[in-house]
Image (cartoon, rainbow, N blue to C red):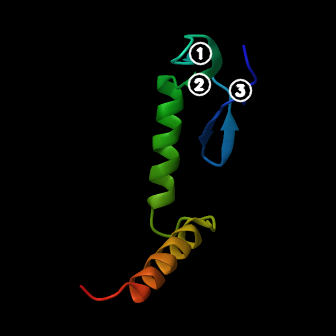
Amino acid sequence: MSTYPDLFLYINGEWRKTANDLPVLNPATEEEIGRLPHAEKSDLDDALEAAATGLRPGAKRRRSSVPMSFTKPQRSCASGKRRSPPP
C-alpha cells in the first residue's frame, strides 16, 4: 500500500477517527492505496447538532478564511474580463 494520508471526519471543530473505513483503490491497478472514513449514525447526528447550534441566533461563530478564498478568484476573473476585447 502506498502512502496515503490518514483521513478523519471534521465535526464541531474537531478531527474524529471513525471505527469503520472503506478502501480507496487505484483504478489502474486496483491496489488499495488508502482508507476513507465511514461515518456512523452517531457521527452524522453530532454533525447535524453542531450545524444546528451554529445557526441559532446569538450563536458564537468562528472566523473562517473561506470568504477570502472566494475573493481572489473573483478578482482575477474580473481583471480578465477588463482585458478581454469587446465582442
Tell me which amino acid carries mark 1.
Answer: Asn
Residue 5, x across and y down, in percent? 72, 30
Q: x, y (%) of residue 42?
A: 51, 27
Q: Mark 3 to mark 2: distance in Å?
A: 13 Å
Location of residue 4 (image quadrant): top right
Nearer the observer: mark 1 or 3; the answer is 3
For label 3, the SS is loop
**Residue at image x 63%, y 68%?**
63
Estimate the x, y position of residue 78 in percent, counting from the top left: 43, 82
Q: Is residue 1 above or below residue 37?
A: above
Which circle's residue, 3 or 2, is located before the other in the chain?
Answer: 3
Residues at marks 1 and 3, CA–CA distance in whole angstroms: 17 Å
Label 2's element?
strand
Q: CA distance from mark 2 to mark 1?
A: 6 Å
Instruction: Determine which residue is flagged by label 2.
Output: 37
Counting from the top left corner in percent of width and height, residue 81 is at 39, 83
Query: Which badge, 2 or 1, is on the more N-terminal residue?
Result: 1
Whether 76 is drawn above or below 39: the answer is: below
Q: Is disc 1 surrounded by few (<14), some (14 to 19) or many (20+) residues within 10 Å?
A: few
Q: Where's the N terminus, which quadrant? A: top right
Give the residue pinned by disc 3.
4
**Residue drawn where x is 61% and y is 10% of the image:** 31
Mark in the foreground, 3 or 2? 3
Residue type indicated by callout 3: Tyr
86 or 61: nearer the viewer: 86
Towards the viewer: 3 or 55:
3
Q: Along the horizontal axis of the image, is 3 left or right of 64?
A: right
Where disc 1 sits, the SS reads strand
Residue at (57, 12) in percent of width and height: 29
